[in-house]
Image (spheres, helix red, strand yellow):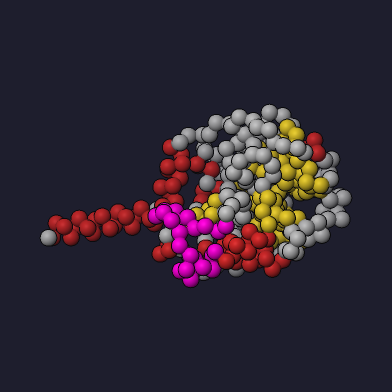
Amino acid sequence: MRKLLIALVLLSSLLGLAFWNRHTLIVAAVRASGPPELLEPNDEGPGTRWVDDYFTVKAIDPHTFAIGEPRYYQQNYSYLILGETRALLFDAGPGVRDIRSVVDSLTDLPVTFLPSHFHYDHVGNTVVFDRVAVVDLPYLRRRAPDGRLLLLGSEHMGFAEAFDAPTLVVDDWVAPGESIDLGGRMLRVLHTPGHSLDSISLLDASSGQAFSGDFVIPGPLFAFLPNSGMGDYLMGAENVLAAAPTHTRIYAAHRMAPPGVPEVGLGDVADLRDALVEIREGVRDGSGAYPVIYPVNERIELWADPAWLQRWEPSPLGD
Protein backbone atom coordinates (compact mmCIF):
# COMPACT_ATOMS: atom_id res chain seq x y z
CA MET A 1 0.00 0.00 0.00
CA ARG A 2 2.84 2.40 0.87
CA LYS A 3 4.46 1.84 -2.54
CA LEU A 4 1.13 2.47 -4.24
CA LEU A 5 0.67 5.73 -2.34
CA ILE A 6 4.21 6.85 -3.23
CA ALA A 7 3.57 6.00 -6.90
CA LEU A 8 0.31 7.97 -6.88
CA VAL A 9 2.00 10.97 -5.30
CA LEU A 10 4.80 10.87 -7.87
CA LEU A 11 2.32 10.52 -10.73
CA SER A 12 0.27 13.39 -9.37
CA SER A 13 3.38 15.55 -9.08
CA LEU A 14 4.45 14.77 -12.63
CA LEU A 15 0.99 15.58 -13.99
CA GLY A 16 0.95 18.83 -12.04
CA LEU A 17 4.40 19.75 -13.33
CA ALA A 18 3.29 19.02 -16.88
CA PHE A 19 0.24 21.28 -16.56
CA TRP A 20 2.11 24.15 -14.95
CA ASN A 21 4.77 23.91 -17.67
CA ARG A 22 2.24 23.25 -20.41
CA HIS A 23 3.37 26.21 -22.54
CA THR A 24 6.94 24.88 -22.64
CA LEU A 25 5.66 21.44 -23.65
CA ILE A 26 3.51 22.92 -26.43
CA VAL A 27 6.45 24.86 -27.81
CA ALA A 28 8.69 21.80 -27.68
CA ALA A 29 6.11 19.84 -29.68
CA VAL A 30 5.84 22.59 -32.28
CA ARG A 31 9.62 22.91 -32.61
CA ALA A 32 9.94 19.21 -33.25
CA SER A 33 8.05 19.61 -36.52
CA GLY A 34 10.74 21.90 -38.00
CA PRO A 35 10.32 25.04 -40.10
CA PRO A 36 7.32 24.91 -42.43
CA GLU A 37 7.67 24.74 -46.19
CA LEU A 38 5.87 27.27 -48.37
CA LEU A 39 2.44 26.29 -49.65
CA GLU A 40 1.67 26.06 -53.32
CA PRO A 41 0.05 29.21 -54.76
CA ASN A 42 -3.70 29.17 -55.35
CA ASP A 43 -6.24 31.22 -57.29
CA GLU A 44 -6.96 34.09 -54.91
CA GLY A 45 -10.15 35.22 -56.58
CA PRO A 46 -11.22 38.50 -58.19
CA GLY A 47 -9.61 41.72 -57.02
CA THR A 48 -6.49 40.08 -55.60
CA ARG A 49 -3.18 40.34 -57.44
CA TRP A 50 0.10 38.56 -56.87
CA VAL A 51 2.88 41.09 -56.30
CA ASP A 52 5.57 38.43 -56.70
CA ASP A 53 5.70 34.70 -55.99
CA TYR A 54 4.89 35.23 -52.30
CA PHE A 55 2.83 38.35 -51.49
CA THR A 56 -0.67 39.27 -52.67
CA VAL A 57 -2.51 42.59 -52.44
CA LYS A 58 -6.21 43.33 -52.40
CA ALA A 59 -7.61 46.86 -52.19
CA ILE A 60 -10.40 46.92 -49.61
CA ASP A 61 -10.97 50.50 -50.75
CA PRO A 62 -8.68 53.04 -52.46
CA HIS A 63 -6.97 53.82 -49.14
CA THR A 64 -6.87 50.40 -47.45
CA PHE A 65 -4.88 47.40 -48.63
CA ALA A 66 -4.81 43.81 -47.40
CA ILE A 67 -1.34 42.34 -47.92
CA GLY A 68 -1.51 38.55 -47.89
CA GLU A 69 1.06 35.83 -47.40
CA PRO A 70 -0.96 32.90 -48.75
CA ARG A 71 2.08 30.65 -49.17
CA TYR A 72 2.99 30.90 -45.48
CA TYR A 73 1.20 28.11 -43.65
CA GLN A 74 -0.51 30.49 -41.20
CA GLN A 75 -2.08 32.46 -44.09
CA ASN A 76 -1.14 35.85 -42.62
CA TYR A 77 -2.71 39.17 -43.58
CA SER A 78 -1.33 42.60 -42.75
CA TYR A 79 -3.09 45.89 -43.48
CA LEU A 80 -1.73 49.09 -44.99
CA ILE A 81 -4.01 51.96 -43.97
CA LEU A 82 -3.54 55.30 -45.76
CA GLY A 83 -4.45 58.80 -44.66
CA GLU A 84 -3.73 62.07 -46.41
CA THR A 85 -0.37 62.72 -44.77
CA ARG A 86 0.89 59.37 -43.50
CA ALA A 87 0.19 55.66 -43.47
CA LEU A 88 0.12 52.86 -40.94
CA LEU A 89 1.10 49.22 -41.45
CA PHE A 90 -0.81 47.01 -39.02
CA ASP A 91 1.26 43.82 -38.66
CA ALA A 92 4.13 42.65 -40.84
CA GLY A 93 3.96 38.86 -40.93
CA PRO A 94 6.86 36.64 -39.84
CA GLY A 95 9.47 38.26 -42.06
CA VAL A 96 9.89 35.21 -44.29
CA ARG A 97 9.96 37.88 -47.00
CA ASP A 98 10.40 41.63 -46.51
CA ILE A 99 6.97 43.27 -46.61
CA ARG A 100 8.47 46.76 -47.05
CA SER A 101 8.88 46.32 -50.81
CA VAL A 102 5.13 45.72 -51.12
CA VAL A 103 4.34 48.70 -48.91
CA ASP A 104 6.65 50.94 -50.96
CA SER A 105 4.86 49.87 -54.15
CA LEU A 106 1.52 51.03 -52.70
CA THR A 107 2.32 54.42 -51.16
CA ASP A 108 4.88 57.23 -51.04
CA LEU A 109 3.60 58.40 -47.66
CA PRO A 110 5.72 57.98 -44.53
CA VAL A 111 4.73 54.69 -42.90
CA THR A 112 4.56 53.72 -39.22
CA PHE A 113 4.58 50.04 -38.33
CA LEU A 114 2.26 48.99 -35.49
CA PRO A 115 1.99 45.30 -34.48
CA SER A 116 -1.37 43.97 -33.37
CA HIS A 117 0.60 41.93 -30.81
CA PHE A 118 4.10 40.62 -30.33
CA HIS A 119 3.88 37.04 -31.61
CA TYR A 120 6.63 36.21 -34.11
CA ASP A 121 4.27 35.87 -37.05
CA HIS A 122 3.23 39.53 -36.76
CA VAL A 123 6.31 41.61 -35.92
CA GLY A 124 8.39 41.02 -39.06
CA ASN A 125 11.35 39.90 -36.92
CA THR A 126 14.49 40.91 -38.87
CA VAL A 127 12.61 43.52 -40.94
CA VAL A 128 13.57 47.02 -39.74
CA PHE A 129 11.01 49.80 -40.14
CA ASP A 130 11.66 53.54 -40.33
CA ARG A 131 9.10 54.24 -37.61
CA VAL A 132 7.57 51.89 -35.05
CA ALA A 133 4.61 52.35 -32.71
CA VAL A 134 3.76 50.08 -29.78
CA VAL A 135 0.74 49.86 -27.48
CA ASP A 136 1.31 51.95 -24.36
CA LEU A 137 0.83 49.55 -21.46
CA PRO A 138 2.53 50.28 -18.11
CA TYR A 139 4.45 47.00 -17.89
CA LEU A 140 5.87 47.55 -21.38
CA ARG A 141 6.88 51.16 -20.65
CA ARG A 142 8.77 50.02 -17.56
CA ARG A 143 10.84 47.63 -19.67
CA ALA A 144 11.77 50.27 -22.25
CA PRO A 145 12.89 53.46 -20.47
CA ASP A 146 15.18 54.23 -23.42
CA GLY A 147 12.54 53.32 -26.03
CA ARG A 148 14.14 49.94 -26.77
CA LEU A 149 11.76 47.07 -26.06
CA LEU A 150 13.29 43.59 -26.09
CA LEU A 151 10.47 41.11 -26.57
CA LEU A 152 10.33 38.21 -24.15
CA GLY A 153 10.15 34.64 -25.31
CA SER A 154 6.67 34.26 -23.81
CA GLU A 155 5.49 37.32 -25.80
CA HIS A 156 7.23 36.50 -29.06
CA MET A 157 7.19 32.67 -29.19
CA GLY A 158 9.59 32.73 -32.12
CA PHE A 159 11.42 29.69 -30.81
CA ALA A 160 8.60 27.69 -32.44
CA GLU A 161 10.17 28.46 -35.84
CA ALA A 162 13.70 29.53 -34.87
CA PHE A 163 13.02 33.28 -34.99
CA ASP A 164 15.03 35.25 -32.46
CA ALA A 165 13.07 37.72 -30.37
CA PRO A 166 13.74 41.21 -31.76
CA THR A 167 14.23 44.51 -29.96
CA LEU A 168 11.67 47.07 -31.10
CA VAL A 169 12.95 50.63 -31.23
CA VAL A 170 9.79 52.48 -30.24
CA ASP A 171 9.15 55.89 -31.79
CA ASP A 172 5.52 56.24 -30.69
CA TRP A 173 3.57 54.81 -27.76
CA VAL A 174 -0.16 54.59 -28.51
CA ALA A 175 -2.48 54.24 -25.54
CA PRO A 176 -5.71 52.22 -25.55
CA GLY A 177 -8.53 54.59 -26.40
CA GLU A 178 -6.19 56.98 -28.21
CA SER A 179 -6.81 57.92 -31.84
CA ILE A 180 -4.04 57.86 -34.43
CA ASP A 181 -4.36 60.72 -36.89
CA LEU A 182 -3.21 59.77 -40.39
CA GLY A 183 -4.46 63.05 -41.87
CA GLY A 184 -8.16 62.98 -42.68
CA ARG A 185 -8.43 59.50 -41.20
CA MET A 186 -8.57 58.55 -37.52
CA LEU A 187 -7.86 55.10 -36.14
CA ARG A 188 -8.94 54.36 -32.58
CA VAL A 189 -6.76 51.94 -30.61
CA LEU A 190 -8.78 49.29 -28.76
CA HIS A 191 -7.14 47.08 -26.15
CA THR A 192 -8.31 43.57 -27.04
CA PRO A 193 -6.36 41.15 -24.84
CA GLY A 194 -7.16 37.46 -24.54
CA HIS A 195 -5.06 35.93 -27.27
CA SER A 196 -2.19 37.85 -25.68
CA LEU A 197 -2.04 40.59 -23.08
CA ASP A 198 -0.54 43.09 -25.55
CA SER A 199 -3.14 42.54 -28.29
CA ILE A 200 -4.83 45.57 -29.82
CA SER A 201 -7.36 46.17 -32.58
CA LEU A 202 -7.90 49.30 -34.66
CA LEU A 203 -11.25 50.93 -35.36
CA ASP A 204 -11.97 53.35 -38.21
CA ALA A 205 -15.50 54.27 -37.25
CA SER A 206 -15.99 56.66 -40.17
CA SER A 207 -15.37 53.97 -42.77
CA GLY A 208 -16.93 51.15 -40.76
CA GLN A 209 -13.70 49.15 -40.71
CA ALA A 210 -11.87 47.44 -37.88
CA PHE A 211 -8.67 45.38 -37.86
CA SER A 212 -8.50 42.67 -35.22
CA GLY A 213 -5.11 40.97 -35.47
CA ASP A 214 -5.50 37.55 -33.85
CA PHE A 215 -8.09 38.65 -31.31
CA VAL A 216 -10.91 37.30 -33.49
CA ILE A 217 -10.43 35.40 -36.74
CA PRO A 218 -12.55 33.01 -38.81
CA GLY A 219 -11.10 29.89 -37.20
CA PRO A 220 -9.72 28.75 -33.85
CA LEU A 221 -9.03 31.42 -31.23
CA PHE A 222 -6.13 30.51 -28.95
CA ALA A 223 -6.67 31.33 -25.28
CA PHE A 224 -4.23 28.77 -23.84
CA LEU A 225 -0.92 30.41 -24.78
CA PRO A 226 1.45 32.39 -22.55
CA ASN A 227 -0.15 35.77 -21.77
CA SER A 228 -3.60 34.43 -22.74
CA GLY A 229 -6.55 34.74 -20.39
CA MET A 230 -10.27 34.06 -20.46
CA GLY A 231 -11.16 37.13 -18.43
CA ASP A 232 -8.92 39.19 -20.71
CA TYR A 233 -10.73 37.78 -23.76
CA LEU A 234 -14.09 38.73 -22.28
CA MET A 235 -12.85 42.26 -21.58
CA GLY A 236 -11.53 42.56 -25.14
CA ALA A 237 -14.84 41.45 -26.63
CA GLU A 238 -16.71 43.95 -24.49
CA ASN A 239 -14.29 46.72 -25.54
CA VAL A 240 -15.00 46.06 -29.23
CA LEU A 241 -18.76 45.81 -28.79
CA ALA A 242 -18.85 49.05 -26.82
CA ALA A 243 -16.83 51.01 -29.39
CA ALA A 244 -17.69 49.72 -32.86
CA PRO A 245 -20.75 50.86 -34.87
CA THR A 246 -23.15 48.08 -35.79
CA HIS A 247 -22.16 48.08 -39.48
CA THR A 248 -18.45 47.54 -38.79
CA ARG A 249 -16.58 45.04 -40.96
CA ILE A 250 -13.68 43.39 -39.13
CA TYR A 251 -10.57 42.31 -41.04
CA ALA A 252 -8.50 39.62 -39.33
CA ALA A 253 -4.87 38.52 -39.48
CA HIS A 254 -5.35 34.87 -40.50
CA ARG A 255 -7.62 32.78 -42.63
CA MET A 256 -8.10 29.02 -42.69
CA ALA A 257 -8.03 28.53 -46.47
CA PRO A 258 -8.08 30.47 -49.74
CA PRO A 259 -9.43 32.51 -51.33
CA GLY A 260 -9.96 35.99 -50.00
CA VAL A 261 -9.23 38.34 -47.13
CA PRO A 262 -10.27 36.99 -43.69
CA GLU A 263 -13.29 38.87 -42.38
CA VAL A 264 -15.60 38.58 -39.38
CA GLY A 265 -18.34 40.79 -38.00
CA LEU A 266 -19.65 42.24 -34.77
CA GLY A 267 -22.04 39.30 -34.56
CA ASP A 268 -19.00 37.02 -34.24
CA VAL A 269 -17.62 39.19 -31.43
CA ALA A 270 -21.01 39.07 -29.68
CA ASP A 271 -21.02 35.27 -30.07
CA LEU A 272 -17.54 35.18 -28.54
CA ARG A 273 -18.65 37.29 -25.59
CA ASP A 274 -21.71 35.09 -25.03
CA ALA A 275 -19.60 31.93 -25.24
CA LEU A 276 -17.13 33.28 -22.69
CA VAL A 277 -19.91 34.19 -20.27
CA GLU A 278 -21.43 30.72 -20.59
CA ILE A 279 -18.04 29.02 -20.15
CA ARG A 280 -17.43 31.08 -17.01
CA GLU A 281 -20.86 30.11 -15.67
CA GLY A 282 -20.28 26.45 -16.50
CA VAL A 283 -23.17 26.13 -18.93
CA ARG A 284 -21.20 25.75 -22.18
CA ASP A 285 -19.33 22.49 -22.60
CA GLY A 286 -16.11 21.95 -24.48
CA SER A 287 -14.41 18.87 -25.91
CA GLY A 288 -10.94 17.46 -25.42
CA ALA A 289 -8.56 17.53 -22.48
CA TYR A 290 -5.93 20.08 -23.47
CA PRO A 291 -6.66 22.43 -24.99
CA VAL A 292 -10.39 22.29 -24.36
CA ILE A 293 -12.23 23.32 -27.53
CA TYR A 294 -15.41 25.34 -27.07
CA PRO A 295 -17.74 26.12 -29.99
CA VAL A 296 -18.41 29.83 -30.52
CA ASN A 297 -20.40 29.62 -33.74
CA GLU A 298 -20.23 27.73 -37.02
CA ARG A 299 -16.95 29.45 -38.03
CA ILE A 300 -15.16 30.07 -34.75
CA GLU A 301 -13.88 27.91 -31.88
CA LEU A 302 -12.16 28.94 -28.65
CA TRP A 303 -9.21 26.77 -27.58
CA ALA A 304 -8.70 27.18 -23.85
CA ASP A 305 -7.15 25.74 -20.73
CA PRO A 306 -9.17 23.22 -18.71
CA ALA A 307 -11.68 24.87 -16.39
CA TRP A 308 -9.48 24.54 -13.30
CA LEU A 309 -6.68 26.46 -15.02
CA GLN A 310 -8.79 29.16 -16.62
CA ARG A 311 -8.05 32.67 -15.39
CA TRP A 312 -11.08 34.93 -15.29
CA GLU A 313 -9.73 37.98 -13.49
CA PRO A 314 -8.25 40.61 -15.86
CA SER A 315 -4.45 40.61 -15.99
CA PRO A 316 -2.71 43.38 -14.04
CA LEU A 317 -0.94 45.82 -16.35
CA GLY A 318 1.15 47.54 -13.70
CA ASP A 319 1.22 51.18 -12.69
Q: Give the residue furthest to the left.
A: 1
- Front residue of 15 and 125: 15
Residue 139, by quadrant, is bottom right
Q: Give the residue furthest to the front.
A: 298
List x then y, in percent, for residue 97: 65, 34
- Quick check: 160 above or below 51? below
Residue 18 in the figure: left or right of residue 272: left
Residue 287 in the figure: left or right of residue 36: left
Placement of the N terminus among the 4 image quadrants: bottom left
The residue that appears at 51% across and 51% down in the rendered structure is 154
**Can the viewer see residue 254 in this picture?**
yes
Residue 55, by quadrant, is top right
Residue 19 in the figure: left or right of residue 152: left
Placement of the C terminus among the 4 image quadrants: bottom right
List x then y, in percent, for residue 303: 50, 54
Residue 129 included in the magenta stretch of the image: no
The residue that appears at 59% across and 44% down in the rendered structure is 256
Bounds of the magenta segment: 275-297
List x then y, in percent, for residue 288: 41, 54
The residue that appears at 59% across and 52% down in the rendered structure is 299
The residue that appears at 61% across and 41% down in the rendered structure is 257
Residue 296 included in the magenta stretch of the image: yes
List x then y, in percent, for residue 307: 43, 63
**Can the viewer see residue 317 in this picture?**
no
- Quick check: 264 above or below 274? above
- Quick check: 165 above or below 312? above
- Quick check: 139 above or below 54? below
